[in-house]
Image (cartoon, coloured by chain):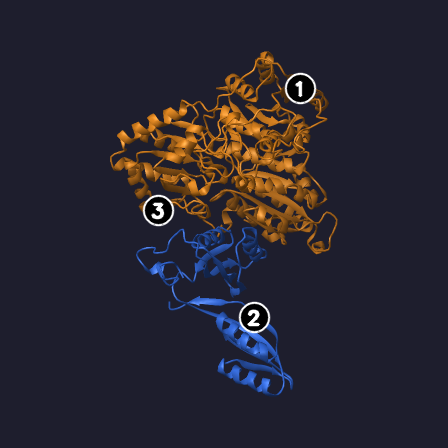
Amino acid sequence: MSPLNIKQGSTSHSAYDLRDPYAEVIEAHTLAVIVDNEPGVLARVIGLFSGRGYNIESLTVAETDHTGHLSRITIVTRGTPQIIAQIKAQLARIVPVHDVHDLTEEGPSVQRELALFKVAGKGEHRIEALRLAEIFRAHVVDSTLESFVFEMTGTPEKIDSFAELMRPLGLREIARTGVAALSRGL
Amino acid sequence: MTQAMTGARMVVQALKDQGVEVVFGYPGGAVLPIYDEIFQQNDIRHILVRHEQGAIHMAEGYARSTGKVGVALVTSGPGATNAVTGLVDALMDSIPLVVLTGQVPTFMIGTDGFQEADTVGITRPCTKMNWLVKDTANLSSTIHQAFHVARSGRPGPVLIDIPKDVQFATSDYVVKEKIKTGHYQPKLKGDIDQITRLVEMIETAERPILYTGGGVINSGPAASQLLRELAEATGFPVTSTLMGLGAYPASGKNWLGMLGMHGLYEANLAMHGCDLMINIGARFDDRITGRLKDFSPNSRKAHIDIDASSINKVIRVDVPILGDVGHVLEDLLRIWKSRGRKVNKEGLAKWWAQINDWRAVKCLTYKNSTSIIKPQYALERLEALTKGMDRYITTEVGQHQMWAAQFLGFEDPNRWMTSGGLGTMGYGLPASIGVQIAHPEALVINVAGEASWLMNMQEMGTAMQFRAPVKQFILNNERLGMVRQWQELLHGERYSQSWSESLPDFVKLAEAFGCKGIKVSDPKDLDDAILEMIRYDGPVIFDCLVEKHENCFPMIPSGKPHNEMLLGDADTQGVIGAKGAVLV
């Protein structure tokens, strides 16, 4: 949260930029980067983050427009407002980058991640795991007598909390896709 | 009409279509088909270098002195890796280059083949953009696109990696008018509202300063003209970064000299004390700002830059203007004139009085000697004896570079070639050859230190072979002068590895290369020696033995703000704290 307790992302809809430009507050931003689907483009984007010391919390990429030959990279990153602005400017000047959207700043957005959990256990633990999976709307996609694989889609926070609950119940492995995000509305 | 041809021929055809006249390069196994095509034509001249790093610096010198795109051609593996330093140098200083590298055939890529290196992987962070062309059908369009990318927006080096089988294979040539330059079309015009805001500030500012950089020169000669017009019409003082020297003439009455770590006292204090800073095509580099917290604390700042990532990167500005310097200055002048050409005359008069007080300090004063040549004196004489000539200056990196920037005057853009951002020792000699190839009749002087000069001295062979009469003006102190200066100021005078023993006899070295060598050590002989150098019709290695322990002043020590400059040796006791010592 900013020092003024203004919700992140609300500023672009205000007539004034209410954030303190010098604030050392670390914010998480979700960026959607539209790029040419060509070899080396992802390496250029990732190289920018490692070369300039920026964080990547999550990164997903796939072709989203086959005829237009475009891919969408969704990056969750953290930094002060100045660093975030700099990341966006640096991304935008990469030649094969078409567009950079800051979903956190541009208004409300939906963020989803898919995760698979392998949970091993017998007896009470196994039943408890199933019960919690139901509450979290996770699906069983594989089952043996001693294990389940659950599939779940949700926000990263939801996946984190489910993982926490599964840990004492025999959580063995997690696979996560990273965040995919779209702005709400048109 | 499409025309089928081999990839190798396509390369030569595409270069011709892009108006390329000179290619700097070095052959090798993976580029032999292209060299075969070069052999069979006369439109493009090839300059054979002695090391691939030299090829890139020559292309840089060519590009910076002409405003055109420089082109280099090197082979795979070591050819490409040797080019890396030059690529980063061009990237940091925004120099447009197209570099072509050979690659092992596509079916061998990834097998650790002979002279194979992951060239696009290695050079990705060293280029504005690079491509590995795997299909001859894409080769000509990629080359045309490469030229578009290199020269558009903030210029920079691009690289095309061409496997040998792609050079042999045949496909249809795509003419340059047919290619899609795609979405990459950087914005040239600035936002009129922001420009108007800046005009309003110009009308009222009491203590304004124009802080100009390499962007003015990259924008083209018209931008320099507009800058001059702006400065004359408003009466605002002008300072410049190392990269921007010559955009505003050194003889101009508003000229304060270079700013920054070794910039002039009046320029740095004006930056510190101004109330309106107009950054035109510069980037608030750390050599300029000193301690960020105390950088020009009481000014409103405007920044004109074509690269959005340069704006608000380290210094927060009040008026960001994204656009090409020439286009923005044109709009700025038009709006300012239409609103009645207003400036704060009273404020400006006081401001100039203050600046003249600072000028009176005469910060470039040094103690001359009758027995030994002071490096500053050598440059003063060089300036006096070459002033008014059709002159181009390149430099290596170090003390001599800063003295050259302080003591030589530049009246026009594109006359001063120096490695600013990367600080590449070994830049000046090959760059001077590139400049001379572009301007065969001009006087081209590389102001050098002996240590830097040795880093690429093999290129004297290139100068001889292609009759480039470059003058190598070496200020020889038998030391790594700038390293030595920092060790004196920061490391308790422990001169670790900062001297050069076993230096060559530069006169004999000149003879060995077949050019002229001149050695001078007595100040009385200096003028005659310089005149002899200028008059000699061919390359000269000029060995000027200078004071060995001279320090370069003024100096803003690392971690200090602009108003804490050192003006001479007497100021230096204990000035750099532990915090400053970790900075470079």
Classed neighbour count for the residue bearing mark 1: other residues with Cα under 10 Å, few (<14), some (14–19), many (≥20)? many
Q: Nearer the viewer, residue B45 or B55?
A: B55
Which three-letter amino acid code belongs to the residue tagged 1?
Gly
Q: What separation in Å lies between label 1 and label 2 (alpha carbons)?
A: 69 Å
The mark found on residue B191 in the picture is 3
Q: What separation in Å lies between label 3 and label 2 (alpha carbons)?
A: 44 Å
Above or below — where is B35 with respect to A14? above
Residue B343 percent coordinates (x, y): 28, 33
Q: Secondary structure at mark 2?
A: strand
Q: Chain letter for orange?
A: B
| CB-based contact (under 8 Å), mark 1 and mark 2 | no
Residue B532 percent coordinates (x, y): 60, 15
Which residue is painted at 42% across and 23% down in the image?
Answer: B361
Name the residue that disc number 1 marks: B517
Residue A126 percent coordinates (x, y): 59, 85
Residue B153 percent coordinates (x, y): 46, 44
Q: Nearer the viewer, residue A3 or A85?
A: A3
Q: Secondary structure at mark 1?
A: strand
Which three-letter amino acid code belongs to the residue tagged 2?
Arg
